[in-house]
Each structure stands twice: as structure tokens, then as C-alpha cells.
Image (cartoon, rainbow, N blue to C red):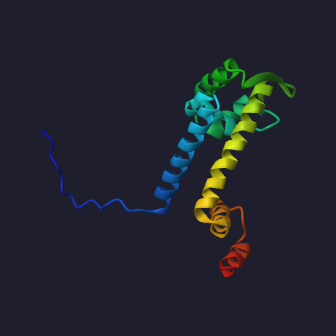
Amino acid sequence: MVKYLDDGSPDLIDHAGWRIWRLSRAWKAEFDAAMAARGYRWFAEARSNVLPHLDRHGTAQSALQSRMGVTKQAVQQLVDELVADGIVERRTNPDDHRSKVIHFTRKGQRVLADANDVKVEIQSRYRAKLGARRFTEFMACLEVLEGKETAPAATAMGRAR
């Protein structure tokens, strides 16, 4: 038997965070589907989440734990899977021979190039849906919310309407 409580709890509200989260999930689903269509079915798996945290010229494996917010063991397993797929390779860190640096292989670089093409395609659909002016404003708003743009530029953007 289930007991229902009418405890006066507040209703969930529609808010910016909820909308950003939903849009992010929709973007990721579209991206993963497009990458799967290009032959990278593993993009919908956890190991693909390592890629955005890798610097293009190599990243110390130890740095991935804090960047990703996961355990050392999880990083190890995800990187092992990417190594097995030939996407990345471990190299000895020239500054500390006890640690490893993760680098993209040539195959991994091709994956990145295909991913960039997919991102441009998705962005083009967003631009077509919003129109050029609104899309430019949308991108500017995202920069402001990320803290990448200073207030004076944001004010000037508001006057351009």
C-alpha cells in the first residue's frame, strides 16, 4: 500500500537550469546519434566522456580524476577502453617517469575531426531554427553566463536590439 502525503511541499518550478539541462541532454543525444551513424557507436558510452577533458597535446592521466570528478579507478577503466579502441595511447610523462600522459592517436584525431563536423552540423540546425541574429545573441548569452564576457560587452549587446 502506498501512502500519499499532502505535506504542502512546493511544486517544482520551470527554471533556467532545468531548460539548460534538457537542452544539453537533447544536444548530446543528437550528437551521439550522429557519431553512431558515422561508425562510432561507443560515443553513447561512458568512455566518450573522457574526450572533452583531454588536451590536444596530451593530458596527465592523474589530471583526469579531478577534471572529470570520478575516481582514479574509473579513469583507469575508461582510458583502458579508449586505448583498446585505438583512440588514445599512454606515453611516459617526460617530467615524471612514474606517470602517464594520454595522447590522441591518429585514429583518435580522425574521431575528433568527425566530431567537429557533427558539431558544426548541429550548430547549423540551431542557427537555422533561431535565425542568424537570434543565434548570435544566444551564443553571446551563453558566454556571459559562463563568465567569458565582461559586463560592458554584454550591455552593448543589449543595446544592439
User: Which quadrant would the C terminus be assigned to in this image?
Assistant: bottom right
Q: Is residue 28 left or right of residue 144?
A: left
Pick out the residue farthest to the top: 84
Pick out the residue farthest to the right: 94
Pick out the residue farthest to the bottom: 159
Q: Please, is residue 109 above or below residue 22 in the view?
A: above
| Residue 71 visible in the shown view | no
The spot of residue 149 in percent (x, y) is 72, 66
Residue sitting at x 65%, y 53%: 123
Tell me how many marks there are: 0
Q: 3 or 104, which is in the foreground?
A: 104
Q: Please, is residue 150 above or below residue 6 in the view?
A: below
User: Which quadrant would the N terminus be assigned to in this image?
Assistant: top left
Q: Is residue 9 left or right of residue 70?
A: left
Q: Is residue 105 left or right of residue 52?
A: right
Q: Quadrant of residue 131?
A: bottom right
The spot of residue 86 in percent (x, y) is 72, 21
Q: 19 or 32, which is in the foreground?
A: 32
| Residue 106 visible in the shown view | yes
Residue sitting at x 76%, y 22%: 90
The spot of residue 77 in percent (x, y) is 61, 22
The spot of residue 150 in percent (x, y) is 72, 69
Q: Quadrant of residue 128?
A: bottom right
Q: 81 or 36, which is in the foreground?
A: 36
Residue sitting at x 65%, y 68%: 137
